[in-house]
Amino acid sequence: MKRPTVIGIAGGSGSGKTSVTRKIMEALDGHSVVLIEQDYYYKDQSDKTFEERLRTNYDHPFAFDNDLLIAHIRQLISRQAVEIPTYNYEIHTRSEETIEVEPKDVIILEGIFALENEKLRNLMDVKLYVDTDSDIRILRRLQRDIEKRGRTMDSVINQYLSVVRPMHLQFIEPTKRFSDVIIPEGGENNVAIDLITTKIRTLLDA
């Protein structure tokens, strides 16, 4: 049986990774595709107090359980189903619920640190980095966090300046050099997305 094609999609918060992912999945209609979101793999913190959990920096690579994520991607490549974890942001630790994911022809891993781990990168056939100007990213984050998460403008801006921006510059932006393709302006770049999906179809039909 043919090995699944693994695609990694990275980029900063608010860069448009989700839009790019959605358009690629839509363009691959006719092929079986599964999306793995890296945010599901935040580390279990049930051994910590609630106060300790509140201090978690979710914009740092250490927040993620990469060992479990790598194991699951390898299982899916081997055509084995996996039970991926879910995360409860209200209590800041892993939920008891899991999601069963069946192996597919295309495995898409999306997340800010999708290209940060070398072992994870080595499992990928196509590595994408969505590159969007910082002013656009902060505006998108403001709109999302205020409208969907009920946060105040001051809290979003303070978090961005104190945590999100420095972590992006230190850990996320440098992973751009590992990508096969850099997509400027995210989901608005239809030319880049068309070229990428053509390449993916070529890999699938080989």
Image (cartoon, rainbow, N blue to C red):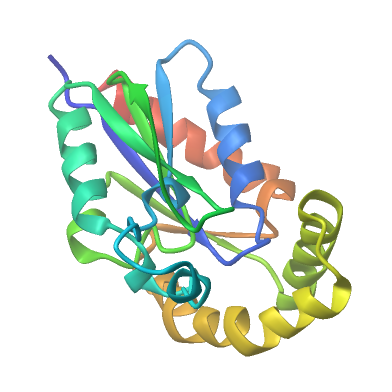
Q: Residue furthest top?
A: 30
Q: Quadrant of the C terminus?
A: top left
Q: Is residue 167 visible?
A: yes
Residue 35 placed where, x, y %?
Answer: 44, 33
Q: Is residue 99 above or below residue 72?
A: above
Between 180 and 152, the residue placed more toward the observer is 152
- On screen, residue 75 versus residue 46, left or right, reads left
Q: Is residue 122 visible?
A: no
Residue 6 placed where, x, y %?
Answer: 30, 38
- Name the residue rendered at 76%, 72% in the picture: 138
Q: Is residue 135 above or below residue 142?
A: below
- Name the residue rendered at 75%, 64% in the picture: 141
Residue 192 placed where, x, y %?
Answer: 59, 47
- Name the residue rendered at 46%, 46% in the picture: 87
Between 24 and 10, the residue placed more toward the observer is 10
Q: Quadrant of the N terminus?
A: top left
- Name the residue rendered at 30%, 18% in the picture: 102
